Every structure is written in structure tokens, then in C-alpha cells.
Image (cartoon, helix red, strand yellow):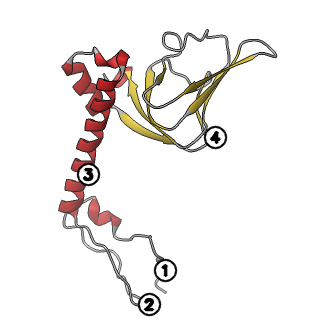
Amino acid sequence: HIPTRIISVGQCFGELGLIQLNLKRLETAKTLSKVQLLYIDYIHYKDAVKLMRNYQVDQILNYINSNMWLHSLDIYTKSKIGFMAKQEIYEKNQVVLSHDTCDNNTIYLIQIGCLKQIIQTSKDTYDIIYFRPKEYFGDVNTILNVKENYPFTIIAIEETICYTISQDTL
């Protein structure tokens, strides 16, 4: 018995062919009805990935140049950040960072979306700070001026895209 998988609109198959050139096909696809397929081969996929990465680097460099804090960095550091930053996508209500998960080593640059930071300053007192596009957060001790003993949580209040820069990558 040969296993069968039915693929619906919007799904894909043959993904391994995007990873390695000239990979031998492992499966046969047969249509059950009239279909229209979009096809991309290994070479064009690699080119698309390079273009997307270059576009992302351009976006990061534009972000850096429009940010007052980052604008003054030298061109070498800006370029390094542009190539080393990672894009992270956070869903609405997803916890982005908390006092338990903070490594004091990463800065988050907000590209799209909005985040809310909740700081518990005493048993019954909370401070709330909002972060919007072109703002940044991270490295709790130096950037947010949060004392280590204050519990905090940063939550996406809508889908949010951030670039993350870690000390390790610089």
C-alpha cells in the first residue's frame, strides 16, 4: 500500500527540491481535478531568497538611519547590524520578552506593530509603557531603566515585526 496525501489550494509539495540542486524526486503527484500550479526551481528560489534578504537589509538600514539613537552609528556598524539582524514576527497577545526570559543581550527594533510593557513596581502597582514602530526595547538594565528585581512582561498587542540584534552577532 502506497501512502496517499491530498493537497489543497494554497498547499505545496516538492519542497526538498528547493534545498538541493538536482535532487531525485521521491514522490509522484497526480491531479484529481483540473489544477493550476505555480512552479519555482532551485536556481530561481535561491535568487528570490537573496533578493528578499537584500530587501530586508535595506529595510533595516533605512530603519537605522531614521532612528535618532542608531543614526549616529558609523557605516561599518550599520552595515553589520543590517546583515546580522534577525526578523521576528509576534502574534497578537504573544509574550515577546519577560524578566524570566530576558538575556540583557538583545535589542529589539520595532518595524511594524505595537507592544505593551507591564512592569510590576510593587505588589499592587503596575506601570505600562507602549512601544510603537521605530522605537526599540531590550537590554533591560540600560535601555528600559528597569530594575532587575521588578518583574516585567512585554506583550504584542497586535501582530508585530521586530528586528533583533544580539551582542553575540555583533
Q: Nearer the viewer, residue 112 or 23?
A: 112
- Residue kind at label 4, given as amino acid type: Asn
Residue on which disc 4 sits: 93
Q: Nearer the viewer, residue 101 or 152?
A: 152
Instruction: Return the x and y of residue 112 as percentages of the image width and height.
Output: 46, 38
Which mark, residue 32?
A: 2
Residue on which disc 1 sits: 6
Which mark, residue 49?
A: 3
Q: Of callouts 1 and 2, which one flags the residue occurring earlier in the amino acid sequence?
A: 1
Front position among marks 3 and 4 = 4
Say which quarter of the image contains residue 71: top left
Residue located 28% across and 14% down the image: 72
Front position among marks 3 and 1 = 3
Q: Nearer the viewer, residue 109 or 68?
A: 68
Say which quarter of the image contains residue 134: top left
The answer for how far apart the CA atoms under marks 1 and 4 are is 34 Å
Toward the right, the furthest residue is: 124
Instruction: Return the x and y of residue 89 as percentages of the image width and height.
Output: 48, 42
